[in-house]
Structures are given as structure tokens and as C-alpha cells.
Image (cartoon, helix red, strand yellow):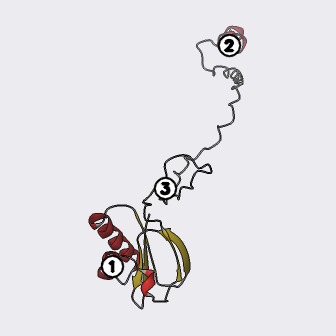
Amino acid sequence: MFWVLLAATLLPLSSAFLTPGGGGCGCAPPPPPPCPMPQLCLPQLPPPPPLCLPSLPRPCLPQLPMISLPSPCGCGRKKRAADRAPQTISGQSGVSSETLCNNPQIRRIILKNLNEDPIQSKTSIHSELKAKLGGNFIVVCSQGSFSFVADSPNYCIDGSKQQTCYVFQA
């Protein structure tokens, strides 16, 4: 009887050890380690294209009238009445002279539109010149002194003690 009792007690224990995964008490074996992940080889990307900034448009400067030279040969039409040729003007700011203005209407426009700010003066003078006289004008206003040379059929330089404005017809 002892052997039967011992066999009855040891039989369930031995089956748990000898046949794993049985429905007894005991834990299931640990899961196998996961398979290593395959390494992905990504294609190499080309380098980025060079950065190209848009180019700024070139400033449009007014074209001054060109003096045409006569033909070297004596043939062709001879012009009896020539257009009024541009006069070369030179001077220095701060020096007042009646010879620095050949158009009294431009002088009136300069004096009428003088402000304390040279930028506002320049803009006001240019707007009124375009409205009243038409054509293309170059307007420069400055509080400092500088010298200049220009060729223009209509010009005027005038101002106040604070600033001087230069107007040349282009």
C-alpha cells in the first residue's frame, strides 16, 4: 500500500517534469528570442541642388539725349535749323547763381515743394514736374554739399539754406 500511495503522489509530479506543456501546474517554457530585424539599406539621396536666389532687375536709368555727329562725307541732307543742344552745367551746391536755372517754371515748382525732408521734397517736385511739364526729369535734393556736371536742355538748381534741389530734364 505504501508503494501505491507513493506512486499515486509521484505520478502527477513526474508527468509535469517529463512531458512539458501538460495541463498541470507548472509554467510554460519561455518564448524563443525574437528573430533579428533585417537591416534596411536605403538608397543614397543625391545632394540637394544649389540654392539659386532670384536676380534683381537692373535699375532703369533714364537715357540722356545723344548728340549726333555729322557725316564725315559731304553728302546727305544738311540741317539748317538745329535742335536746341543740351547745355553742360556744372556747379557746386551752396553756391547761388542765376546761371544755374534756365527755366523759371521749374524754379517755381522747386520752391513751392520744398519740405524739411529732402526725400519728401524730391518726391513732391518730381510729381509736379511730371504733371505740369511732362517728360522725364531727374530730381536730386540734398542737405549736404556736392558738385555735379550734367548735360540738359532744361535745368534748375534752387533751394533754401537747409537743402538744395537739382532738376535736370532727361
- Where is residue 30, by image quadrant? top right
Residue 78: in sight, yes or no?
yes
In terms of depth relative to the viewer, which is nearer, 169 or 85?
Answer: 85
Local secondary structure at mark 3: loop
Residue under label 3, please give it.
60
Mark 2 or mark 1, whichever is nearer to me: 1
Return the x and y of residue 1 as percentages of the image width and height: 68, 8
In terms of depth relative to the viewer, which is nearer, 44 or 120?
Answer: 120
Inspect the image, locate mark 1, and give the three-letter code of the amino acid beneath it. Pro
Return the x and y of residue 17 as percentages of the image width and height: 71, 15
Q: Give the mark nearest the N terminus, 1 or 3.
A: 3
In terms of depth relative to the viewer, which is nearer, 143 or 166?
Answer: 166
Residue 20 is labelled as 2
Find the distance from the CA under tag 1 to the CA under tag 3. 29 Å
In the picture as drawn, the residue positioned furthest to the left comes out as 132
Residue at x-position 65% and y-position 41%: 50
Residue under label 1, please give it.
104
106 left or right, relative to 6: left
Return the x and y of residue 87 as percentages of the image width and height: 49, 71
Residue 163: in sight, yes or no?
no
Local secondary structure at mark 2: loop
Inspect the image, locate mark 3, and give the three-letter code of the amino acid beneath it. Cys
Residue 144 is labelled as none
Inspect the image, locate mark 2, and give the three-letter code of the amino acid beneath it. Pro
Q: Give the mark nearest the N terminus, 2 or 1.
A: 2
- Where is residue 106, by image quadrant? bottom left
In the picture as drawn, the residue positioned furthest to the front comes out as 74
27 left or right, relative to 91: right
